[in-house]
Amino acid sequence: MSLLTQSVWVIGVFGGVMVFVLSFFRDPNRRRVYADTDIVAAADGVITAIKEVTVNGEAYVQIVTFLSVFNCHVNRIPLAGVVRESVHIPGQFLAAFRGDIDQKNERQETDIDTVIGCIRVVQITGAIARRICCELVANQTCKTGERFGLIRFGSRTDVYLPKNKVTLQVKKGDRVKGGLTIIATHSSH
């Protein structure tokens, strides 16, 4: 009888791990009609910070989304455009919830030329996340909400938008869904 109990326990643990992994790698089909002015979340998760920063000498707003191990980890294009470049930067694997990992951890930085100028999407690894998948290459045309990559297990995705060309629609603590939640709007005029 103890072998049966152990087997049931092992089956339960294995089943739980299997459900977790399948849940993590889920890729929901998200369809939405976007207004021309919509800028959408690049990932599912919680907005943990919104900061004013400088990128190449210009004022930008950095929107930080923390993805727990329970979030869908598929990343999506915030705003349609043409990929300028996508660069992999080696680094550390510090916990993704730390505020200072954007320049320390391994990451993929993708710059996209859009109607509001260059935006940047940064996929950042965490202590558990050790692999970034990014399918974007220079000169590739991409659409708002389109899938472009994946970060495997808990991580962070940052979106950088030109500060004077957007109106934020989210705040710290908001839960967002990649490709669905409008994080900002813009006027391309």
Image (spheres, rainbow, N blue to C red):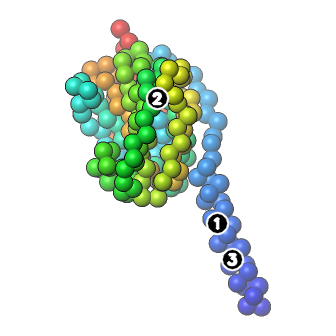
Q: Is residue 70 left or right of residue 14?
A: left
- List the residue tagged with mark 2: 78
Looking at this view, is 110 or 11 the one in front?
Answer: 110
Q: Earlier in the sequence, mark 3 or mark 1?
A: 3
Classed neighbour count for the residue bearing mark 3: other residues with Cα under 10 Å, few (<14), some (14–19), many (≥20): few
Is residue 135 visible in this depiction of the protein? yes
- List the residue tagged with mark 1: 16
Residue occupying the point 61% across, 59% down: 20
Going by the numbered disc 1, the residue's amino acid type is: Gly
Q: Earlier in the sequence, mark 2 or mark 1?
A: 1
Going by the numbered disc 2, the residue's amino acid type is: Pro
Q: Quadrant of residue 111?
A: top left
Residue occupying the point 37% across, 14% down: 187
Task: Provide residue 36's location: percent of width, then percent of height.
Answer: 48, 16
- List the residue tagged with mark 3: 10
Looking at this view, is 135 or 32 the one in front?
Answer: 135
Q: Is residue 132 left or right of residue 56?
A: right
Secondary structure at numbered mark 3 = helix
Q: Quadrant of residue 85?
A: top left
Residue occupying the point 65% across, 54% down: 22
Task: Provide residue 71's location: percent of width, then percent of height.
Answer: 52, 49
Residue occupying the point 31% across, 49% down: 104
